[in-house]
Amino acid sequence: MSSEVTKSKVLSSLFWKLLERGGTQSIQFILTIIFARLLLPREFGLIVLVTIFVSIAGIFVQSGFNTALIQKKDADELDLSSVFYLSIFVAIILYFTLFFSAPFIATFFNQPEFISVLRILSITLFFGSFNSIQIAIISRNMQFKKLFLSSLVAIIISGILGISLAYANFGVWALVSQQLANQLIITVVLWFTVSWRPLFVFSIKRIIDLFSYGWKLLVSALLNTLSANFQSLVVGKIFSPAMLGFYNRGEQFPSFIVGNIDGSIQSVMLPTLSSYQDDKQRVKEIVRRSVVTSAFIIFPMMVGLAVIAEPLVKLILTEKWLPSVPFLQIFCFSYALLPIHTANLQAMNALGRSDLFLKLEITKKLLSFAILGVSIPFGIYGIVWGGFISSLLSTFINAYPNRKLIDYSYHEQWRDIIPSLVISIVMGGIVYTLNWLNMTEGLTLIIQVITGIISYIGIARIFKLECYMYLLINIKDMFRSKKKTKIINYEV
C-alpha cells in the first residue's frame, strides 16, 4: 500500500469516526440537555452512580481483547470466535454478580432506588459482549462508516423513547430506557451490517496468546476507569446525588467536546500506528502530528468554553444548574490535556509495549489516588482541582517512555503545543472582555463564539502557525481529491 493511499484511508477513516462520534454524541448531548431541563439533579446523580458500576463491569467483558485483536496482524476466525464466546461468558458472570450485590451497594450509598436501576441497566453488558467483535473488525478494516450508521439509528430512536418517558414523568427510568434501547439497537444493526458470524470453535491457546497482550490493557483500562470515576463515587458518598448531578453536568460540556475529537483520533491512530510499528521514525511523525493538531483544535475550545461557562449554563440548562459552572471551568483545564495523553499511550500500544502501558497506568493511578486523598479535606472544589493537578503531572509520565521508544521527549512535545496554548489564552482574554457587554445571554454567546473563532484563526494565520498551515493544506487537498473522484466517476 502506498503512503498516499494510506494517508487517504486514514483521513477518510478519521472523517467517518469524527462523524460517528461527533454526530451521534451531538444528538446525545442535545438529549442530555433536554433531560436536564425535565429531570432533577438528584436523578442525574443516581444514574451516574449506577453507570460507574456498569462501566467497570464492561471493562471485564472486553478484557483487553478488542485492542489485542486490532493490534494482532494475523488475527483469524478462530481468534474472533474464541473471544466472542469468552465475552458472553464473562458478561453472564458479571451480570449476576451485580444483580446480587445491588442491595449492598444501595445500602452503602443510602439509595434504595439504586437496586432496581442497577439490575436493569446491567443488561447492557450482554449487548457489549455481542458487538465487541464487530467493532474490532470495523476498527481493523477502518470501516467506521458502518459504526456511524448504526450509532445514528440507535441514538435517534432511543432518544425519542427517552424524551417521551421523561415528559411522562418517569424520572430516572427515562434515562435507563434510553441507554438500554441505544445499546440494543446498535447491537442489532451491527449484527446485520458487519458480515462476520461466530463459528462453533473455541481455542484456549488463542485466548491465552491474546490475553498475554490484552491482560495488561485490561488492568490499565480498569485502573483508568476506577480513577476517572472514583471522584464521582467519593462525591456521591460524601456529599449527595444532587451534588454529583452538578459535578457531572459540569464535566458534560468539556467531556463531550474533547471526548469526541480525542476518541475519533484514538480509534484511527491505533490501527494506523500498528501498520507502521516496524518504522519508529514514521510512528514518531504520526504521534507528533497528532499532538500538535489536537492541541491546535482542543486548547481554544477549552479556553473559550471556560470563559463563556456561566451564560452558557444559564441559557442551555436553566438557572437550577448554575452550581455546575465552577466544575465546568475546572474540567476544561483537565480535558485540554487528554489528547496529549492519548497520542503517547497509543504509540506504546501500537509498538506492542502494553507492559509499559500498564506500568504507566499503575504509576498514574497511585498518584491520582494520593492527590485525591490529600484534596478531600479541601471540599468538593479541592477534589476537582486535585484532578487537574493529577492530569497535568500525568502528561510528563506518559511522555517519558517515548523518549527512548520513538525519540520524542516531553520537552519536544511541550515545545510543539506551546504556540497553540499561547494564542488560545490570548483569544480567551479577548472573548472574556465581551462579558461586560450589557446584552442577553444568547446574543452575548453568539458574539463571543464568532469573535473567538475569528481572533484565533486570525492570530494563527498572522504568525503562520505550523499546524494551521498543515490543516489548511490538507483540507484543500481533501476537497481537490473528492472533486477529482467525482469527475472521474462522471466520465466513467
Image (cartoon, grey):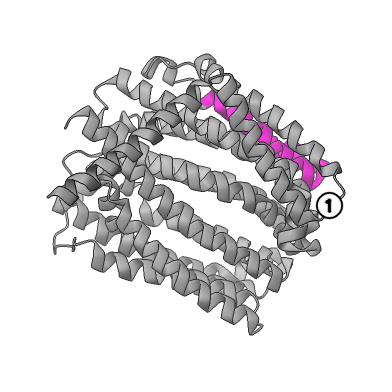
Instruction: Tell me, yes or no, whether the highlighted magenta stretch contains residue 388.
Output: yes
Q: Is residue 490 above or below residue 352?
A: below
Residue 203 percent across, percent down from the top left: 17, 53
Which residue is at the far bottom?
168
Residue at left offset 67%, top offset 38%: 452
Displayed quadrant of residue 106: bottom right
Displayed quadrant of residue 37: bottom right
Work out which quarter of the rendered image holds the N terminus and state it: top left
User: Which secondary structure is most common in the magenta stretch?
Assistant: helix
| Nearer-the-camera pick, 466 or 140 | 466
User: Which residues make up the magenta segment?
Assistant: 368-397
What residue sits right under mark 1 in the picture? 439
Residue at left offset 81%, top offset 62%: 319
Q: Is residue 127 above or below residue 404?
A: below
Q: Badge 1: how crowded within 10 Å, few (<14), some, or many (20+)? A: few
Mark 1: which amino acid?
Met
Residue 478 percent across, percent down from the top left: 34, 38
Instruction: Tell me, yes or no, whether the highlighted magenta stretch contains residue 485.
Output: no
Q: Is residue 30 visible?
A: yes
Q: Is residue 468 above or below residue 128?
A: above
Residue 380 percent across, percent down from the top left: 78, 47
Instruction: Please give left or right for residue 167 compared with residue 433 in the image.
Output: left
Residue at left offset 76%, top offset 31%: 429
Q: Is residue 445 above or below residue 93?
A: above
Displayed quadrant of residue 418: top right
Residue 422 percent across, percent down from the top left: 65, 23
Describe the element under mark 1 as helix, strand or loop: loop
Instruction: Please give left or right for residue 381 compared with residue 360 in the image.
Output: right
